[in-house]
Amino acid sequence: MAGIDGIDFLQLDMPAILLAVLAAVACAIPGNFLVLRRQSLLGDAISHVVLPGIVIGFLLSGTTSTWPMLLGAGAAAIVAVALIELVRRLSGLESGAVMGIVFTSMFAAGVLILERSEARNVHIDVQHALYGNIEGTVWLEPASIRDLLDPAILATTPGEIARLAVVVLVIAVLVVAFFKELRITTFDPGLAATLGFSPGLVSAGLVLLAALAAVAAFDAVGSILVIAMFVCPPAIARHLTDHLAMQVVLSVVAAVAAALSGYVLAAFVPLWLGYGHAFNVAGAMAVTAGLMLAVVMLFAPRYGWLARRLAGSRSAGVAGSPGTVAD
């Protein structure tokens, strides 16, 4: 990763930043509804279970091209969702426990297949599965800012960036189109059924959206960042507003902020401090998102710990003031 100087930034840093931002936004949008439904662990599960699908997709096709691996990952995500529901019904265990069982088992199976197959001889490995390959994203064609307006140059956009841009657009359009259904089934499934919506069908659609985001982002940014972006930006936004539409918008802002600040922390700060090596970008983004969430949990204007503590103190003061008389 290069410092901030002209052509190096355009060709090395900008593509990685775009990839990180798109991955964060793709996961954050469906993550809002998972957080509100108390299904955050589902995003964690999906981000893990795509690994065996990716490996099997490679083994069956013999290539690391996009579509075989995406289809394999998507199939694995669907199998995982079906297994979660099956185990939950047969065992009677709580959903979180069932998800933990299924996603750890499938992820472990993916690691075993990966380590014992020829997939380990290509760029797919355990470290890649965890941390992704943001730093390896380069775009050598642009030589100046003006080149970014050239259709011929834009046509050479790295495949990971183009794919994630399409996924973000699809997710955004579907969430806007079905926002009413998502909102009602999230807060009052009984009312949704009365109004003619199928809570189960909407929930299944939400899971597929989350799976789409996880599958598209997994190869580029790894499972750690996918998990963080499903949970942290929506949780940050939830502390700042009671309005769902505004929460979605704020989660996107938080995702972009975490991606940008995480990249700066990983790529530039070590160099500015004189260190010879940068940090891992995906790890730095996840840490930054966690720190942002910690700050909001403490200092959010209404729901932060400090605001609630002050409100409790004022309430106690009013209740105990000399002029207050109970009827």
Image (cartoon, grey):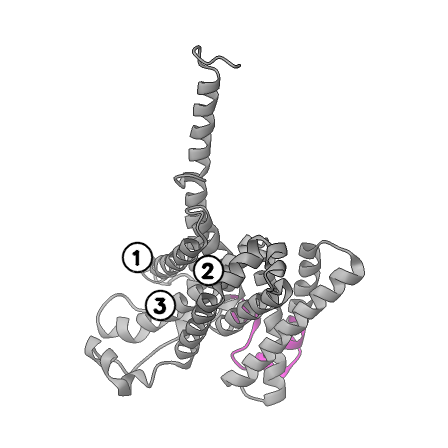
Query: Where residue 190 sits in the image (x, y, percent)?
Result: 63, 55
* Prevalent SS, magenta region: helix
Residue pointed to by mark 3: 17
The residue sitting at 41% across, 44% down in the picture is 295
* Residue ID at (77%, 61%): 89
Which callout, 3 or 1, points to the residue nearer the camera?
3
User: Is residue 5 shown to the viewer in this render?
Assistant: yes
Which residue was labeled with disc 1? Answer: 274
Residue 14 % position (x, y): 31, 71
In three-dimensional space, the C-alpha distance between marks 1 and 2, rounded to whole angstroms, equals 20 Å
Q: Is residue 50 left or right of residue 296?
A: right
- In space, the residues marked 3 and 2 are separated at their CA atoms by 14 Å
Above or below: residue 63 compared with residue 116: below
Kindly indicate the quadrant of the structure image that contains residue 87: bottom right
On residue 283, the disc is 2
Q: Earlier in the sequence, mark 3 or mark 2?
A: 3
